[in-house]
């Protein structure tokens, strides 16, 4: 599960966090039901924003279904979202994940430098792209902007003089198309322009924050990074991110929404927190890596690593291999891989109006 929007149950009202989890689990189950267990690997925090935006624009809440107990919910059942917005989120996640896989293959990152691994990953990427395109077509969503973004990104990264915003443009276009289509699914076309604007800002922010987070590792491994390739320092990248957060806030304010609270919490509040968190980590002068748990074994790589990754996926994260940093953590602790920086600052026992989440909730 990857993405920049990582709500923590200690930093969000109980009611809103429950809604967010309903969309997250709904996305995971939609991927499983339509595309098989392996497709659950592409479940991600940012992709479910498509589902949240679709529900927020409709007069009635999206239908729910009762899901069985899951390890990541502490073996509890839950009501999860089952609607067209979740299926669109699944399609978008599959197509973009296939592009990410191809990017790793082209760059020869880690295991992908091995011929057999690259060949297998290429087949998986083709399957995910085909599956996502099929679901998108069923929802009257043209996947061309997403598929084109993957090809255009690869082309731009081969240019010697591409600027930073030129490099983020394909991601901006892809997210804008996905956000804009939620207006069609919700039957609210007047929101389309503002949604596309929000998508462009969010796409830029996601691309830049991912680059900042990976910058040190990419430099050490000699892997392509848009900041290094364009000669952009952290100060300039921070200005671009702050501008994107501001533009995103204005675009969200223009939306005509039936339920605004969760959208505001994710697209406004959490993006600001993500920007502060990632740049705070990147700008530390002498960051020291946290000590590795002595109980963990080294990752052997190769086929064994791939088999263990598949086992972890098929058991909803219950199984963790001996070298996984989450092996000795509870399911609740695994929910926020970025760490919780808001514990005790919000409203675990609030009632009435909750200022921090901009909502009225029943915590």
Image: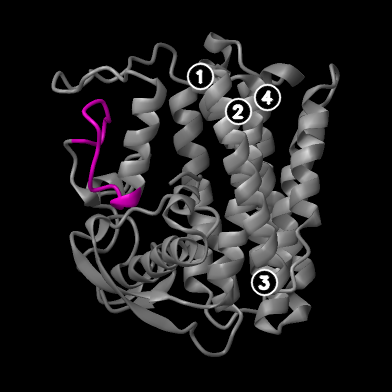
Label 1, secondary structure: give it. Answer: helix
- Residue 98's spot in the image, x, y percent? 62, 43
Tag 4 near tag 2, CB within 8 Å = yes
Label 2, secondary structure: give it. Answer: helix
When the figure is inspected, residue 60 is found, relative to residue 305, above or below; the finding is below
In this rendered view, identify the residue nearer to me: 197 or 276: 197
Instruction: Looking at the image, tell me whether mark 3 or mark 4 is earlier in sequence order.
Output: 4
Q: Quarter of the image containing the C terminus?
A: bottom left
Residue 316 on the magenta span: yes
Tag 1 near tag 4, CB within 8 Å = no
Residue 351 on the magenta span: no
When the figure is inspected, residue 196 is found, relative to residue 169, above or below; the finding is below
Q: Mark 3 to mark 2: distance in Å?
A: 30 Å
Query: What residue is rendered at 59% in x and 84% in y?
Result: 58
- Residue 104: mark: 2
Please tell me whether mark 1 or mark 3 is closer to you in this view. 1
Label 4, secondary structure: give it. Answer: helix
- Residue 106: mark: 4
Q: Which residue is mark 3?
A: 182
Q: Mark 1 to mark 2: distance in Å?
A: 8 Å
Q: Mark 1 to mark 4: distance in Å?
A: 11 Å
Q: Is residue 120 visible?
A: yes
Tag 1 near tag 2, CB within 8 Å = yes
Q: Which stretch did the figure color magenta?
A: 314-327
Query: What residue is rendered at 53% in x and 74% in y?
Result: 260
């Amino acid at each position: 599960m990857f993405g920049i929007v990582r709500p923590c149950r200690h930093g969000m009202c109980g009611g809103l966090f429950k809604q967010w989890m309903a969309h997250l689990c709904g996305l995971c189950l939609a991927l499983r039901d339509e595309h098989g267990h392996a497709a659950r690997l592409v479940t991600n925090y940012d992709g479910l924003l498509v589902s949240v935006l679709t529900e927020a624009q409709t007069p009635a809440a999206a239908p729910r279904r009762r899901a069985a107990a899951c390890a990541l919910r502490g073996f509890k059942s839950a009501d999860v979202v089952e609607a067209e917005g979740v299926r669109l989120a699944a399609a978008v996640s599959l197509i973009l994940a296939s592009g990410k896989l191809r990017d790793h293959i082209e760059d020869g990152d880690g295991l992908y430098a091995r011929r057999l691994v690259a060949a297998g990953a290429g087949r998986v990427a083709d399957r995910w792209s085909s599956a996502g395109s099929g679901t998108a077509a069923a929802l009257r969503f043209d996947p061309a902007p997403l598929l084109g973004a993957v090809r255009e990104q690869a082309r731009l990264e081969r240019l010697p003089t591409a600027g930073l915003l030129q490099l983020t443009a394909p991601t901006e276009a892809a997210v804008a198309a996905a956000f804009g289509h939620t207006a069609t699914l919700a039957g609210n076309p007047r929101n389309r322009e503002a949604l596309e604007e929000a998508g462009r800002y969010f796409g830029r922010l996601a691309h830049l924050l991912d680059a900042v987070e990976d910058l040190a590792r990419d430099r050490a491994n000699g892997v392509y990074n848009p900041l290094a390739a364009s000669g952009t320092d952290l100060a300039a990248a921070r200005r671009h991110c702050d501008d994107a957060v501001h533009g995103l806030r204005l675009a969200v304010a223009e939306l005509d929404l039936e339920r605004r609270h969760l959208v505001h919490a994710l697209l406004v509040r959490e993006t600001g927190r993500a920007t502060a968190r990632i740049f705070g980590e990147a700008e530390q002068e002498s960051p020291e890596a946290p000590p590795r748990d002595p109980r963990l074994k080294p990752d052997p790589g190769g086929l064994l690593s791939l088999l263990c990754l598949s086992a972890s996926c098929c058991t909803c994260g219950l199984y963790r291999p001996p070298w996984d940093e989450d092996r000795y953590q509870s399911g609740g602790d695994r929910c926020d891989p970025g760490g919780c920086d808001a514990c005790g600052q919000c409203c675990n026992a609030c009632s009435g109006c909750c200022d921090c989440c901009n909502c009225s909730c029943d915590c």
